[in-house]
Each structure stands twice: as structure tokens, then as C-alpha cells.
Amino acid sequence: MTAEQLTYLVFGVVLLIALAFDLGLLNKKNKVISLRQALYQTIFWVLLAMGFFVFIWFEDGETLAFQYLSGYLMEWSLSIDNIFVFILIFSSFAVKEKFYGQVLLKGILMAIIFRVIFITVGVALVNKFEWVLYIFGAFLVYTGIKMFSAKEDAEFDPHQSKVYKFLNRFLPLVPHDGAGRYRVKEKGKPAYTTLFVVVIMLAVTDIVFAFDSIPAVMGISRDKMVIYTSNIFAVLGLRSMFFLLKGAVNKFGHLQQGIAIVLVFIGLKMLAEIFHFTVPIYISLMVILICIGGSIFYSLHEAVKNNPKE
């Protein structure tokens, strides 16, 4: 068994055990998750991801380990931005808090499946047509510049989104949660509840974010194992992060700018390879830590400054 095969095997086993533990012991259907539980679960997923970082360090070397850590931090920061859109969707469709857990679980599992497909296709394209990587780089620079000044999350209305309009056009929808069900019968005919709509919208929202995040990780590492594992570990922590941050939507007002700078940096890093200029991985890691960490601390500082009572 090669080192790469062993890493994949360990990742798969850890993933299955962690999911069984998270779903079987930490969560029960239709149970409201407290802030304390959300904090413990977030710490659990972060420690698990860091434990895998240590394993890669000893098994595959420090270069791949730092690539994994950089990719994970990139995905983790993008996940926070993703969560704020999730909160808007839940609020718009008036989802009861006791249904949050099951809806998030289904949406996130769908997101993982789609991400695996996207990563597989993306890696195959880059391996066959290396110039695709430069397109990804240009796309990240464009996205980062656009994101820096955009306020899309504040203007986003789930009921006016293309996804909702598509579902409403082709499926019979009912304006209630069906007491926790996704499909009910109305006047003898099947119809889909708001919970079904929210699950689909969560999955599609993550797919949209994946168009930024997957090229960004590919700009950090070309190793398939690093891309897969950093993505999936970050996505798995989405649910607990949601419960942890759902009351702090307005406290991370400058995170978007931090993410935007990182996306521009990684895009330029990818484009620089046209001229055979390679940025060391520790530089990428430092930029990610400084930009994301700095934007979070500055956001919290401004939030406290503007609302001293909080």
C-alpha cells in the first residue's frame, strides 16, 4: 500500500467514525442545538481536521501538510461566508429551529457529493489541459475584485432567486414545513414543503460557492488528496458553525474583504506560473492567516465599537 493510498484509507475511516459519532451521539432528530453544543461540535471538527494535518505531516511530508492546512483554512473561511447565506434562507422560509439540524445535514451531504464530482472533473481537466488552471486564476482575480466591494448577501432574497423560481414553476409547493416532512399530500396530490425547498437551496448555494473555493484550493495544491480532504473537512464543519454563528450575522462585516484579498492573491499566484514563478506554500499560508484572521478580528473590533453593550 502506497503512502497516498494509506492517507485515503485513514481519511475514509476517520470520516465514517466521525459522522457516526456526530450523527448518532451528538445530534438527535428535531432537537434544538444550544450554543454550548455548537461550540463543542465546532471544536470537535476543527481538532479532527488538525489531527489529519499532523497525520499528513508524518505520512506525506511537511509540504503536503502545509498545502492541506492552507486549503482547509481557505475553505473554512469561505464556509463562514456561506453560512450567512444559509441563515438568510432559513429566515426567509421561516424554518423552525428544531428542524435546522436535519435540514442542514441533508443539504450538506448533498453538497459533499456535488463537491466530489466537481473536484474530480476539475482535476481531470487541469491534468489534460493545464491552461485551464490559468482560466481558474483569472476567474479568481475577477471574483475577488468583485467580492471586495459587493454587498450581495444583504440584497439576496431567496424567494426571488432563480432556484426558487425554478422549483416553484415545475413542482407543486406548499407554504409550510409539513411538520418536518419534505413531501406531503394536498388534496390527494403530492406536494413539496418549505423544508424540501430549503434543502435544495442549501445544496445549490454551496455549489455556487464551490465555483470559487475549488479553483482556490487548486491554486494552493494540485494534489487530489489535499483538494478532496481540505474541502470535505471544511464542509463537514458547516452545520456546527451554522449554530455557532447564526446569532452573529452582523459581527463579521469585513470578512468578505479578507476573503476577496485571498482570492485575488491565489488567482495571481496561479497566473504567475505562466512565467514559471512559484510562490512558496508558507507564503500562501501566511497570506491566508493574516487576511482571514485580520478581517475577523477587525470585524469583531468594529462590532464592539459600534455596539459597546454587546
Image: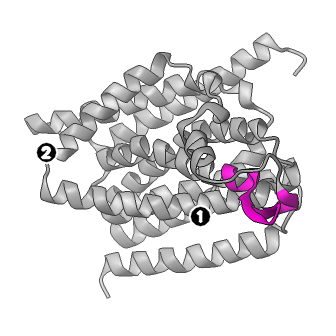
Residue 28 in percent (x, y) is at 84, 69
**Viewer-proximal residue among 39 and 240:** 240
Question: What residue appears at the point 53 percent right and 32 percent down from the top-left corner?
Answer: 292
Say how many tags the image has: 2
Task: Mark yes or no: residue 6 visible.
Answer: yes
**Within the magenta stretch, is there residue 117?**
no
**Viewer-proximal residue among 151 and 284:** 151
Q: Which residue is mark 1?
A: 109
Query: Which disc is residue 131 wearing?
Result: 2
Quadrant of the image for the C terminus? Answer: top right
Where is 249 relative to 285, above or below?
above
Task: Mark yes or no: residue 53 visible.
Answer: no
Where is 219 relative to 17, above or below?
above
Q: Quadrant of residue 88?
A: top right
Mark 1 is surrounded, within 10 Å at the Cα level, by few (under 14), some (14 to 19) or many (20 or more) other residues, namely some
Question: What residue appears at the point 77 percent right and 50 percent down from the top-left corner?
Answer: 174
Please indicate whether residue 155 sits to the left or right of residue 64 in the image: right
**Within the magenta stretch, is there residue 196?**
yes
Question: What residue appears at the point 64 percent right and 22 percent down from the top-left corner?
Answer: 154
Magenta range? 178-198
Which marked residue is nearer to the observer: mark 2 or mark 1? Answer: 1
Label 2 amino acid? Trp
Give the Cα separation between the discs numbered 2 and 1.
Answer: 32 Å
